[in-house]
Image (cartoon, rainbow, N blue to C red):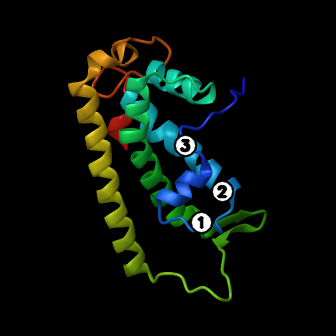
Amino acid sequence: NIRIMNYLIDLASVKELSYVHENVENELVRKVLKRSQDMYIEPIVGTDLYDRLLDGVGNNNLTANELILVNDYIIMVLVISVELRLSDAGTTEIRNIGTGIAREQSFEANDPNRMERTKDMTYKDLTFYKNRLKRYLCENHLLYPLFDSSNLNGIKPEGKANSYSQNF
């Protein structure tokens, strides 16, 4: 059962707010954004609130509090997680003969040490914004009833039973 995917941020905004260059293929950014939403946002906010936010963005009917949550807290987690994931996905190609590194003649990739420093800095940024989002939700959970709701089949918000966010 394939679910139609909405995104919490549009691709142009991802590129505008991040270090992702405009020449990165939108299809690659879209795939990484989908994974980032599922891996970083849904475990923090829980399936009920996550689904509501996707629906609200898709139907342009977010409440004022939901707009604050998305615009002021969730967006930066998504943007930075996309940067982090694209740092590997952007140069790796999986083909029928194997997995390798894509190269361009007019571009010099980071050496392994510089790449690790870049990823480390980006991971620290991601950790900061994830913690900021978690703190905001904990301090303002009464504004988001779906954050406190339990969903038997979905992911519960971080810190509650059946949460997967500890893995990331």
Q: Is residue 142 above or below residue 81?
A: above
Which mark sits nearer the N-terminus, 1 or 3?
Answer: 3
Of the residues shown, which amino acid type is indicated by label 1? Gly
* Crowd rating for badge 2 (residues with CA inside 10 Å; few <14, some 14–19, many 20+): few
Q: CA distance from mark 1 to mark 2?
A: 8 Å
In percent of width and height, residue 24 lies at: 64, 65
Q: In the image, is 131 to the left or to the right of 85?
A: left
Residue at position x 54%, y 37% from top?
A: 8
Which mark sits nearer the N-terminus, 3 or 2?
Answer: 3
Q: Is residue 70 above or below residue 79?
A: above
In percent of width and height, residue 119 lies at: 39, 66
Q: In the image, is 61 to the left or to the right of 96?
A: left
In percent of width and height, residue 75 lies at: 44, 44
Tally of numbered tags:
3
User: Mark 1 touching mark 2, by CB under 8 A?
Assistant: yes
Quadrant in which the N terminus is drawn: top right
**In front of the other: 28 or 21:** 21
Q: Is residue 27 above or below residue 64?
A: below
Q: Tell me the residue that label 2 is attached to.
A: 28
Secondary structure under the numbered disc 1 in the rendered image: loop
* Extreme residue in the front direction: 64
Q: Tell me the residue that label 3 is attached to.
A: 9
Q: Tell me the residue that label 1 is attached to.
A: 90
Of the residues shown, which amino acid type is indicated by label 3? Ile
Q: Is residue 164 shown to the viewer in this render?
A: no
* Crowd rating for badge 3 (residues with CA inside 10 Å; few <14, some 14–19, many 20+): some
Quadrant in which the C terminus is drawn: top left
